[in-house]
Image (cartoon, rainbow, N blue to C red):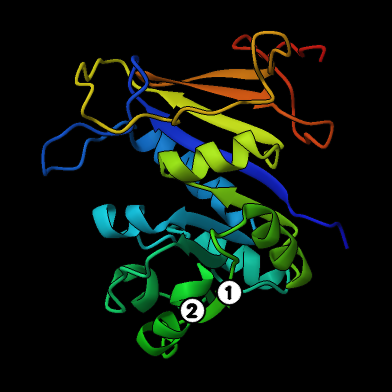
């Protein structure tokens, strides 16, 4: 068993790098073609991870939408849906959120040590609560997921989670979708926070694929030597990494 899962980060952002705007309505950064692509990626993963803020703000279900893809997972001897994973420092989560109440998949909550008891009282009936350290250590989370049999992990946000996995050098692949508009509001959440990133100006990330999906574009970056996937450009020609 690998010491950590193969980890891919999936994100949609505006041209100017924002994940959302400041209105109450959810900002759609994708389209039907890309939603279907993401569903296919989810179907190929053992677990999907989001931060607690994403659960509070977006109330995601984190399930495979396609019945055909769910059936294919079952035929492979896997659960219909990947394991759901979240990380929280203050355990401000609603046990009635869709993350906990939809689907039969296992739910894992990694919480900071000081809130572990509170988390077990609040969420113990709907999820497995794991002490993740103080503060929660994403290296520990990755190692624990691997020990639980997670071979392929998909991190879907938000910005804090993307920043932690990137700056701690735990990401093997980045799938970044760019929407054709600007948000233009510095109060809005960005793709990543401040930090020291392994893929800096002196260690450029390797572009593995460019794909047009209607009015959005998918950029796939190889972030480690573990990168696994077809490497092509927008014309279908292979890229040398």
Relative to 62, does residue 236 appear above or below in the rendering?
A: above
Is label 2 in a helix, a strand or a loop?
helix
Relative image position of residue 198 (x, y in whole percent): 69, 25
Relative image position of residue 52 (x, y in whole percent): 38, 59
Name the one closer to the observer, 213 or 124. Answer: 124
Relative to 217, does residue 25 appear above or below in the rendering?
A: below
Is label 1 in a helix, a strand or a loop?
strand
Tag 1 near tag 2, CB within 8 Å: yes
Residue designated by label 1: 131
Residue at 67 percent across and 34 percent down: it is 173
Q: Which mark is residue 116?
A: 2
Disc 1 to disc 2, how far (Cα)? 6 Å
- In this picture, residue 40 sits left or right of residue 193: right
Relative image position of residue 4 (x, y in whole percent): 77, 55
- In this picture, residue 163 sits left or right of residue 61: right
Name the one closer to the observer, 89 or 184. Answer: 89
Is residue 109 in view? no
């Amino acid at each position: 068993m690998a010491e950590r899962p193969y980890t891919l980060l999936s994100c949609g952002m505006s041209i100017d790098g924002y994940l959302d705007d400041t209105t109450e309505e959810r900002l759609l950064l994708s389209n039907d073609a890309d939603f279907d692509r993401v569903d296919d990626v989810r179907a190929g993963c053992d677990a999907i991870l989001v931060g607690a803020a994403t659960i509070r703000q977006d109330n995601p279900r984190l399930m495979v939408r396609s019945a055909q893809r769910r059936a294919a997972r079952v035929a492979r001897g896997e659960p219909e849906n990947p394991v759901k994973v979240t990380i929280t420092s203050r355990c401000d989560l609603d046990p009635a959120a869709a993350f906990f109440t939809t689907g039969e998949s296992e739910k894992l909550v990694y919480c900071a040590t000081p809130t572990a008891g509170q988390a077990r009282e609040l969420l113990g009936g709907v999820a497995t609560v794991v002490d993740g350290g103080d503060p929660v250590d994403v290296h520990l989370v990755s190692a624990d997921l691997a020990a639980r049999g997670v071979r392929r992990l998909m991190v879907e946000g938000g910005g804090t989670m993307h920043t932690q996995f990137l700056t701690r050098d735990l990401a093997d692949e980045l799938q970044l979708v760019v929407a054709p508009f600007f948000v233009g509001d510095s109060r809005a959440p960005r793709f990543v926070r401040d930090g020291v990133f392994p893929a800096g100006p002196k260690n450029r990330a390797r572009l593995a694929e460019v794909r047009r999906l209607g009015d959005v574009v998918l950029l796939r970056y190889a972030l480690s030597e573990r990168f696994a996937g077809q490497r092509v450009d927008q014309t279908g020609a292979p890229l040398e990494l």
